[in-house]
């Protein structure tokens, strides 16, 4: 198993930047695909970005492509989501998720482990 803890959320103005971190403990971090999801009030949780075990492949939702960058440092058991050019519609709770097996990247059901989430609020 793996335990995930997100940090780095906060309040930022439109056009600003934040970097979220996902710290993992437990089983070998490099064994997991990592995804970032977000959930706005009254909406379903949606995919934002994912990264494969060694970081060789990344995947993004169209809504964040070109603005967000997912990365990982396996030696530090940590994944990141760098968010630039933030918009009010990016306001949500952001969750880090992990899956051990190969497969899809975009659905919440594909992931086995979840963090508690960190709030990101973008003011207009």
Image (spheres, grey):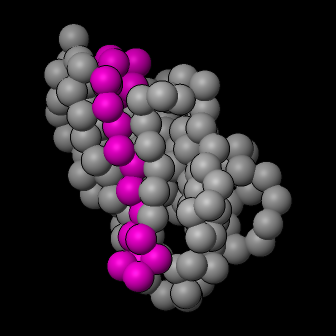
Judge whether 36 appears above or below 75 on screen.
Answer: above
Left or right: where 87 falls relative to 94 = left
Query: Is 14 or 92 nearer to us in this picture?
Result: 14
Task: Work out whether 31 lies above or below 45.
Answer: below
Residue 85, relative to residue 32: is it above or below? above
> Residue lying farthest front?
56
Vertical position of residue 83 compared to residue 77: above or below: above
Q: Is residue 73 left or right of residue 64?
A: left
Q: Point out the stretch of residues depicted in magenta.
A: 73-91
> Which of the 4 quarters of the picture holds residue 80?
bottom left
| Whole-percent x, y for residue 17 in the image | 24, 34
Residue at left offset 49%, top offset 87% = 26
| Quadrant in which the C terminus is drawn | top left
Q: Answer yes or no: is residue 32 visible.
A: yes
Image position of 67 (left or right of 7):
right
For residue 116, say whether it is visible.
no
Q: Position of residue 116 (x, y in %)?
A: 41, 59
Task: Tell me, yes or no, whether the highlighted magenta stretch contains residue 52.
Answer: no
Q: Is residue 37 left or right of residue 91?
A: right
Q: Residue at x 77, y 71 (%)?
A: 101
Residue extending furthest toward the bottom: 27
Residue at the location (26% across, 30% down)? Answer: 121
Residue extending farthest to the top is: 124
Q: Quadrant of residue 61?
A: top right
Q: Position of residue 72 (x, y in %)?
A: 45, 64
Q: Is residue 88 magenta?
A: yes
Query: Is the N terminus in the top left, top right, bottom left or bottom right quadrant?
Result: bottom right
């Amino acid at each position: 198993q793996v335990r995930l803890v997100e940090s780095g959320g906060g309040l930022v103005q439109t056009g600003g930047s934040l970097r979220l971190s996902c710290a993992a403990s437990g089983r070998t971090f490099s064994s997991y695909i990592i995804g970032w999801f977000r959930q706005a009030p009254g909406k379903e949780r949606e995919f934002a970005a994912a990264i494969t075990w060694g970081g060789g492949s990344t995947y993004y939702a169209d809504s964040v492509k070109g603005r967000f960058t997912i990365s990982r440092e396996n030696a530090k058991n940590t994944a990141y989501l760098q968010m630039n050019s933030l918009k009010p519609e990016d306001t949500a709770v952001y969750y880090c998720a992990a899956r051990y097996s190969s497969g899809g990247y975009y659905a919440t059901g594909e992931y086995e482990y979840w963090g508690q989430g960190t709030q990101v609020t973008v003011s207009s």
